[in-house]
Structure formats: structure tokens, C-alpha cells
Amino acid sequence: MMDDPHVNYWEAIKAYEAYWTSHTKPVGESDMDVKNVSKNKKRFSQREIREARAEAAMRMQVKKFEWWKIKMEPFVKEDGTIMTADERRKMN
């Protein structure tokens, strides 16, 4: 939703929060270095590697959304639409 320039800011946040009511949000940094698995003393199964990569990708999406939320907040109109780039330039 955050990639859609016509998204309603409040609906995007509502959908994001609704998703996390039934899912576990990834926190912190990965506890398994999937790029250097061969250097680790513990051998990881393919399933563990796949899960770690999926969690890392989800963590990145969470961080991306949180950053988008902060970055867009000053440009949200009362109806929830986000100002266009032209509208933002006219503000200055």
C-alpha cells in the first residue's frame, strides 16, 4: 500500500496494525548470519536458512513501512490522502 501514491494514509496504517494483531512482528536483528552460514560453527538446515531469510525480508518490510509512516506523516491531508510532490514544493 505504501508504494501506491493514491493510498489513504490512515487506511494503510489500519491495515498494517490489523495484520500484526494475528502475526508475530519480527524484532531486532537476525540471530543467524545467513550470508555466512558456512563460517558459523553450527550447521543450519535448509529449512532454518529459508525461515531466517523470510524473517529478514519481513523485518526489512517492517522497517520500510515504519520509515514511510514517519516520513509521510507531515504531508497527510485531513482526508488521509498524501500530498503530491508538487503540493509539497508549493508548501515551501
Image (cartoon, rainbow, N blue to C red):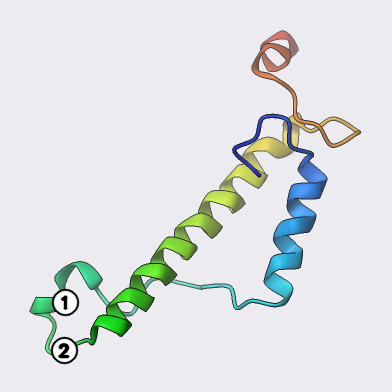
Please name the residue that numbered disc 1 is placed on. 37
Q: Is residue 48 left or right of residue 61?
A: left
As drawn, the label of residue 83 is none
Q: Secondary structure at mark 2?
A: loop
Label 2: few (<14), some or many (≥20) within 10 Å?
few
Find disc 2 in the rendering and name its residue: 43
Does the CB distance between marks 2 and 1 fall below 8 Å? yes
Mark 1: amino acid: Val
Residue located 24% across and 73% down the image: 33
Q: Is residue 28 left or right of residue 6?
A: left
Viewer-side residue, 48 vs 73: 48
- Between 30 and 38, the one lying in front of the other is 38
| Residue 46: % across, % down | 24, 81
Residue 63 spot, x, y in % from top left: 52, 56
The mark nearer the N terminus, 2 or 1, is 1
Residue 20: x %, y % from top left: 68, 70
